[in-house]
Amino acid sequence: MWAKLKDGDVRAMGDLYDIYVDELFAYGMQFSKDKSHVMDAIHDLFLNLYKYRKTLAVTDNVTFYLFRSLKNNILKVENKNRAFVPFLLDQDEKCDEPSIEDLICSEEFEEKREYNLAKAITKLSKKQRKALFLRYTEERSYEDVAAIMNVSVQTSRTIIYRAVKSLRKQLFT
């Protein structure tokens, strides 16, 4: 279906939408409690998929691509809507809207954080990356992770624990 979408097949986009809309909505509600905001982000996601279909990367994991894109769309809007009060303002001063500089700084900070996380994830073992993906991206239980990876539940917990510990060490030291 992904290849058909890239070729401009509207029906393929509709099929992708039908397959993923419920999962995307449930996932999106973790980042925003506003149902209409989440649905708008999903619609924007599919609109952008079609709009930029010729430049879409080839992916072997459409689910991850869609979930990641939705999360980015929601967080981008949330960050713009969030009132940002610069720490340099006096307490008596009020800031009704964040300035352009504040928004740019906020976006740059978020991009840098995402870059550092992606870089840290690449340093994990393949097994750790797979376990983290299953647990946190696909929101699988430890039991599911264990079954998929063909290890015991305790081993799946240990792999995930060590991966998170490694990420914390890389990111916060």
Image: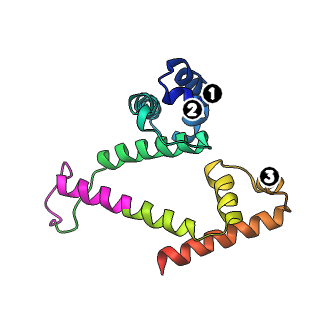
In the rendered view, would you say 7 is above or below 98? Answer: above
Q: Residue at x 84, y 61 (%)?
A: 151
| Disc 3 element | helix
At x 36% / y 46%, what residue is drawn? 76
Residue bearing the label numbered 2: 2
* Depth order, front residue of 39/131: 131
The reply to whether the magenta stretch includes residue 94 is: yes
Provide residue 43's location: percent of width, then percent of height: 44, 28
**Dots 2, 1 in contact, CB < 8 A:** no
Residue where numbered disc 3 is placed: 148
Q: Residue 78: x percent and y percent?
A: 37, 46
Highlighted range, magenta: 89-111
Towards the viewer: 66 or 160: 66
User: Mark 3 is on which residue type?
Assistant: Ile
Residue at the spot 22% in from the left edge and 67% down from the top edge: 87
The quadrant in which residue 105 appears is bottom left
User: Is residue 163 visible in the rendered structure shown here?
Assistant: yes
N-term-proximal mark, 2 vs 1 = 2
Q: Which residue is mark 1?
A: 19
